[in-house]
Image (spheres, rainbow, N blue to C red):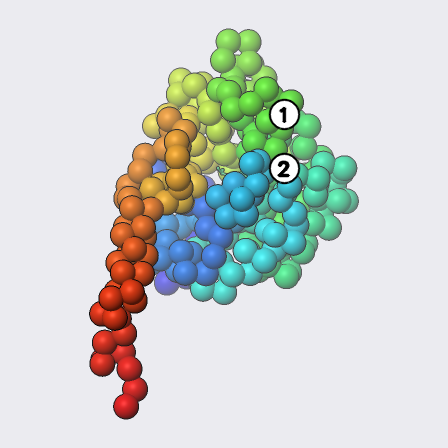
Amino acid sequence: TARVRVHHLQQAKERGERWAMLTAYDTVSASVFEEAGIPVLLVGDSAGNVVLGHTSTVPVTVEDILLMTKAVTRSTKRVLVVADLPFGSYEAGPQQALATSVRMMKEGGAQAVKLEGGGRVAPQIRTLTENGIPVMAHIGFTPQSEHALGGFRVQGRGAGADQLLADAHAVQEAGAFAVVLEMVPAEIAGQVTKELSIPTIGIGAGVDCDAQVLVWPDMAGMTGGRVPRFVKKYADLRGELLRAAREYADDVRTGAFPAPEHSFE
Ligand code: KIV
Ligand code: NA
């Protein structure tokens, strides 16, 4: 089957069909998600936390995202791959955003990019779309700004609702093909979804968004420790991997592995 395109996501909204996005950082998991029928994969800078061992997304570099985008695009042919623009790679202005995004498309093989911010990054979104690069926006809680926002907090409550609505309209007006709503009250996310013609993709934003996204190691129970309230764990991959690693180590100690069938004559 053919590649998922931006207009398919637009058609899904018009038909009222919800869809799921996942993050992907490597070639094997990306191929699993494509086989599962996930239409859109995000090479997210959440890799800073869940792959690279940083405590935030701030240190993630363009080279980090490029490396992972290449891995994801090599093993997939149907999913729409979105490369996240890391902190510091687009804020300076439209030309910086364009230069970074061209690398994500040309070298990484991505079909779209994502950046954080509302009206503030409208000039970047406009320049990218005018140059043939589909842009996914990201508003509400934006992890790259966690130090300015005072940590992981729900955005768009009370007086913040007007700002959120204004940002949603600003990114649509600038040409974004979709917008991620992170940690936004469900009711406000529902209102944004109704008001916008482009799809909304929720994470901690309730069921009324057009689509949902989760960080895959959270979704699959691979991440250690606490996960945010908005995560549902669909597996215990960490437990399963732990069991497998222990069993392998035990088998090596006892001599149960390798058996004759794993050995050459
Ligand atoms: O980096 C990421 O994983 C993201 C999603 C949570 C939207 O930006
Ligand atoms: Na991100």
Q: Quadrant of residue 16?
A: top left
Q: Say which residue label 2 marks.
A: 58
Tell me what residue is drawn at x 61 percent, y 33 percent: 144
Amino acid beneath label 2: Val
Question: The N terminus is located in which quarter?
Answer: bottom left
Tell me what residue is drawn at x 48 percent, y 20 percent: 154
Total labels: the figure holds: 2
Amino acid beneath label 1: His
Q: Quadrant of residue 15?
A: top left
Tell me what residue is drawn at x 70 percent, y 43 percent: 89
Q: Camera-side residue: 31 or 105?
A: 31
Q: Kindly identify which numbered label has been placed on residue 147.
A: 1
Q: Camera-side residue: 148 or 192?
A: 148
Q: Are marks 2 and 1 in contact (CB under 8 Å)?
A: yes
Residue 100 drawn at (x, y percent) = 69, 49
Q: Camera-side residue: 220 or 8?
A: 220
Mark yes or no: residue 11 visible.
no
* Depicted 13 relative to depicted 165: above or below: below
Residue 72 drawn at (x, y percent) = 49, 58
Determine the residue located farthest toward the bottom in the rendered image.
265
Which secondary structure, mark 1? helix
Mark 2 or 1 closer to N-term?
A: 2
Q: Kindly identify which numbered label has been placed on residue 81.
A: none
Residue 219 drawn at (x, y percent) = 35, 41
Q: CA distance from mark 2 to mark 1?
A: 10 Å
